[in-house]
Image: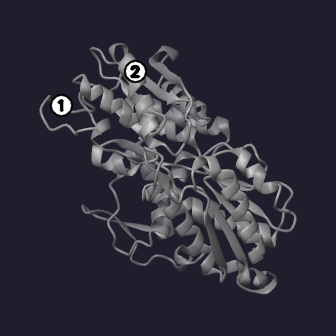
């Protein structure tokens, strides 16, 4: 018999008209097997690990696995676990672009796609030099997009507009001019920081001739085809995990203004409601700071640390709160401030961030990892559709983030053990 929590989730899914939770999990696992090109016989995470990762019940995972086994994607081996099927069906390994290789769509084989993104490199904390950041969304998103376009015989031209923030608008305009001079057939804008830059691109591009597709983090009000990931559902997953660890109350921690904070706060509140908690079970701690630049990671962490210092006496008490920070840098800043006052993640509080920044792994910070690779592949599909079957109604593809559980969100039984130095 399903638990009350599972029943509540299913009622919410049916009411919202969204896909069943088991289908969402099955789609995510199927996509991972395909995009990671996992070899037949590769061992998969356990049912329990999958439930934690996706923020769902074991029953939901069992339904998803049963579906994937019936499709020939996975196989179970008695007393040994779950594996990629040794006879995976050819349809699972084929490219989603195969149907476009011949006939009326043969002209797409030679399509030349322009790609623009400001996040190829970031500026360091002093804003004086640029640094590579392998955890940023660009490498997996762009790489997956380039591979997908290449699979159907197309080519790509990439332009990095991540110059100094003050010059970014001009960098973007110049990149568009360069790509138009090359004769691109379509254009992808990847993780652009705001609608202002998107609108600036649209003043240069005739979208009736050259389709423009967005791969964005969350909200974007410009009516263009786009691929995004759902921050509200990601926050719900994060909060569900914290509640499953026994946290009696939830805290949403947002030290600086960001458009995507509102959705993530609502996701935390959703989790509380689904678990029968009152509105008082969620505390929102939000700062008034406005970032001078989204590129300055040091500024983000400093604002977080300053806000945490003033909030710690009321946030951490006799119980262990579950904290959802609105990104990893906010979480790291909180952890730094907490450590200076003798509070440790996993012992005095649990915390989860967003984006799975490279520092998060080293610090043991749990995080919601966006589906960057899937974003690139889905963006390529939208580009192809825009070239072959133009539509006046912009299509939106919404993907889901994955929960990466580390020490910061696992309740420790005793007070011993090693803590991480937060820098």
| Image: 239 above or below 172 | above
**Residue farthest to the front, as pictured:** 128
In which quadrant is the N terminus drawn? Answer: top left
- Residue 349 visible: no
Answer left or right for 303 relative to 148. left
Where residue 381 appears, x then y in whole percent?
67, 67
- SS for dot 2: loop
Could you tell me how far apart the alpha carbons at marks 2 and 1 are, in whole angstroms? 19 Å
The residue positioned 55% from the left and 34% from the top of the image is: 291
Seen from the viewer's position, the closer of residues 65 and 363 is 363
Q: Which residue is at a point 24% across and 61% down the rendered structure image?
A: 79
Q: Is residue 411 above or below residue 84?
A: above
**Mark 1 residue element:** loop
Q: Can you tell which quarter of the image residue 239 is in?
A: top left
Whole-percent x and y of residue 340?
25, 26
Contact flag, marks 2 and 1 (Cβ < 8 Å): no
Residue 194: percent from left, percent from top:
67, 44
Q: Quadrant of the C terminus?
A: top left
Mark 1 surroundings: few (<14), some (14-19) or many (≥20) residues within 10 A: few
**Residue 293 visible in this rendered orientation of the protein:** yes
- Report the side of 192 relative to 57 (left or right): right
Residues 140 and 269: in front is 140
Q: Which residue is mark 2?
A: 249
Tell me which numbered mark, 2 or 1, is placed earlier along the sequence. 2
x and y percent of residue 33 in the render?
A: 45, 67
Asked whether, in this view, residue 285 is left or right of residue 142, the answer is: left
Does residue 171 lie above or below 220 as drawn? below
Count of numbered tags? 2
Name the residue located 40 percent from the left edge and 43 percent from the top edge.
Answer: 367
Residue designated by label 1:
413
Mark 2, residues whose alpha carbon is within 10 Å: few (<14), some, or many (≥20)?
many
Q: Quadrant of residue 421?
A: top left
């Amino acid at each position: 018999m399903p638990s009350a929590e599972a029943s509540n989730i299913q009622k919410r899914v049916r009411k919202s008209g969204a896909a069943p939770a088991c289908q969402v999990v099955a789609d995510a696992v199927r996509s991972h097997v395909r995009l990671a090109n996992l070899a037949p016989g590769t061992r998969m995470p356990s049912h329990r690990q999958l439930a934690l990762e996706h923020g769902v019940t074991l029953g939901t995972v069992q339904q998803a696995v049963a579906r994937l086994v019936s499709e020939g994607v996975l196989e179970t081996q008695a007393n040994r676990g779950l594996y990629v099927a040794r006879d995976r069906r050819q349809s699972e390994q084929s490219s989603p672009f195969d149907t476009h290789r011949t006939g009326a769509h043969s002209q797409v084989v030679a399509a030349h796609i322009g790609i623009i993104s400001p996040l190829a490199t970031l500026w360091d904390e002093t804003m004086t030099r640029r640094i590579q950041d392998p955890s940023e969304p660009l490498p997996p998103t762009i790489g997956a997009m380039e591979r997908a376009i290449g699979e159907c015989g197309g080519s790509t031209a990439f332009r990095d507009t991540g110059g100094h923030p003050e010059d970014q608008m001009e960098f973007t305009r110049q990149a568009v001019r360069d790509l138009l001079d090359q004769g691109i057939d379509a254009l992808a804008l990847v993780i652009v920081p705001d609608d202002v830059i998107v609108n600036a691109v649209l003043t240069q591009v005739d979208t009736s001739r050259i389709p423009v597709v967005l791969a964005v983090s969350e909200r974007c009000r410009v009516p263009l085809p786009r691929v995004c990931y759902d921050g509200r559902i990601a926050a719900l997953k994060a909060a569900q995990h914290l509640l499953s660890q026994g946290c009696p109350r939830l805290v949403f921690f947002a030290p600086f203004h960001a458009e995507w904070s509102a959705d993530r706060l609502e996701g935390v509140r959703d989790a509380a409601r689904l678990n029968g908690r009152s509105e008082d079970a969620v505390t929102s701690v939000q700062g008034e700071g406005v970032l001078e630049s989204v590129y300055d990671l040091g500024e983000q962490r400093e604002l977080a640390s300053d806000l945490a210092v003033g909030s710690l006496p009321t946030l951490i008490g006799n119980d262990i709160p579950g904290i959802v920070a609105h990104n990893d840098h906010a979480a790291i800043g909180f952890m730094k401030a907490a450590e200076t006052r003798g509070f440790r993640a996993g012992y005095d509080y649990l915390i989860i961030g967003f984006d799975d920044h490279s520092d998060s792994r080293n610090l043991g910070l749990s995080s919601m990892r966006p589906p960057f690779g899937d974003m690139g592949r889905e963006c390529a599909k939208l580009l192809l559709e825009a070239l072959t079957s133009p539509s006046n109604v912009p299509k939106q593809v919404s993907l889901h983030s994955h929960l990466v559980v580390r020490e910061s969100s696992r309740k420790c039984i005793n007070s011993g053990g090693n803590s991480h130095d937060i820098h």
